[in-house]
Amino acid sequence: MKITSLRSLSLALLLAVTGSLFAQPANDDCSGAVELFPSNTCNPIDGDVGGTTQSVPAIWCDGWTGVADDDVWYKFTATETTHAIQLGISGDWDPVIDIRSGGCDGTNIDCVNGTYKLMTGLNIGETYYVRIYHWEATLPSNTAFTICLLDGLIPPPNDDCSGAIELIPSLDCNMVFGDVANATESIPPITCNGWTGVANDDVWYRFTATDVTHTIILGILGTWDPVIDIRSGGCNGTNIACGDTPNTVVTGLTIGETYYVRIYHWFLSQPSPTSFGICLVGPAPATCDADAGTLSADSPVCLVAGSADISATPNGDAVVPPGYETMYVLTQGMGQVIVDVFTDPAFTVNAADDYAIHTLVYDPNTLDLSGVLPV
Ligand SMILES: [Ca+2]
Ligand SMILES: [Ca+2]
Ligand SMILES: [Ca+2]
Ligand SMILES: [Ca+2]
């Protein structure tokens, strides 16, 4: 009996030493679960399965049961009905994400054998537990990983017409990246070529016509079955044309008018992938917007016999459309009081002060200086 108790003692000592050598993480057991807080973008925190032991048996997940000999624990309180867990791993890490409810250890309610788990149907205010382990019986070669908790479904910025992204026409297809992930229906679907799909994932674009005809081209992959809904009359507006192929020619447009383009996947299910490209083919808009450009001050000057000549040199980046004219305006003091105008950026002043020379590019037919008051 004495020998038996001595053996137990030496085994316990060995375990204690072994535990300290592997620096067992505090979250090896559910009682030490590290709390995760949700954010819009992934704020990764460091984790490690090195030196851990199994807390509860492995779960059946995605058709397989791995080996939970290295499980570690996290927990979070749902602030939305949907959150996502995202892991950062390297090398041969083969993670299982085991989502549990009902307190420590609890009951498995969801899982994935992968690095990203979208969780839906959560109860706001309820605490959930997340167990992570490497599927294999061996440790991953790099036992470290990162984990973050993401906010719920974040819709794309152009989910609503008010967030429509502008398409700039060009003769080449200048693809803009788009995505319908987490988009929701803005307005009911249209009937296009005799079919009515499901607009549960519509996103919005707009463009100003530079021709009476434009072509909208989508770059799609996989299961994408796009509907292109062209609308006029402002946001949401009225359907004027449509296409159910990735390449749609729109005719009868008015140059200078703004049109809206709604894109959605014809089916109820999400397309895979949810991303796509879109471009608008047509003449590029004329670059005739007036631009005053910039000036560089010439050398500092001193008053000599009560006067000084100050000047600046245009940097050559002004845009003066046909019919427009340029003049230079001299202002004095912090209040920028206009004291002179001239056709060149050169003035004679007769008092020491801070002066600024401004460029004015203007259309002589529309220039209205009535807002400028004498002082
Ligand atoms: Ca464990
Ligand atoms: Ca394992
Ligand atoms: Ca939408
Ligand atoms: Ca759809």
Image: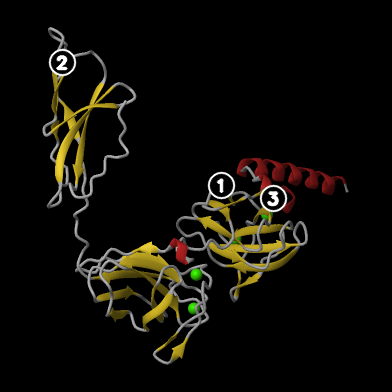
| Residue 119: image tag | none
Query: Depth-wise, is mark 3 or mark 2 nearer the camera?
Result: 2
Q: Which x, y percent locates residue 79?
A: 67, 56
Q: Nearer the viewer, residue 42 or 372?
A: 372
> Is residue 189 toward the left or the right of residue 23 in the image?
left
Quarter assignment of residue 351: top left
Residue 128: x %, y % from top left: 71, 58
- For the question of whether residue 293 can be seen, the reply is no
Look at the numbered discs 2 and 1 and tell me whether their residues touch, using CB distance below 8 Å.
Answer: no
Q: Nearer the viewer, residue 211 or 261?
A: 211
Q: Would you say 52 lies left or right of 46 here? A: right
Q: Which of the two labelled residues, at mark 3 and mark 2, occupies the earlier sequence position?
A: 3
**Nearer-N-terminus badge (2/1):** 1
**Residue with the mark numbered 3:** 33
Give the alpha-carbon distance from disc 3 to disc 1, as whole Å: 13 Å
Question: Which of marks 1 and 3 precedes in the sequence?
Answer: 3
Q: Residue at coordinates 69% horizontally, 68% vertically from top-left?
A: 109
Q: Ligand 3 within 8 A of label 2's CB? A: no
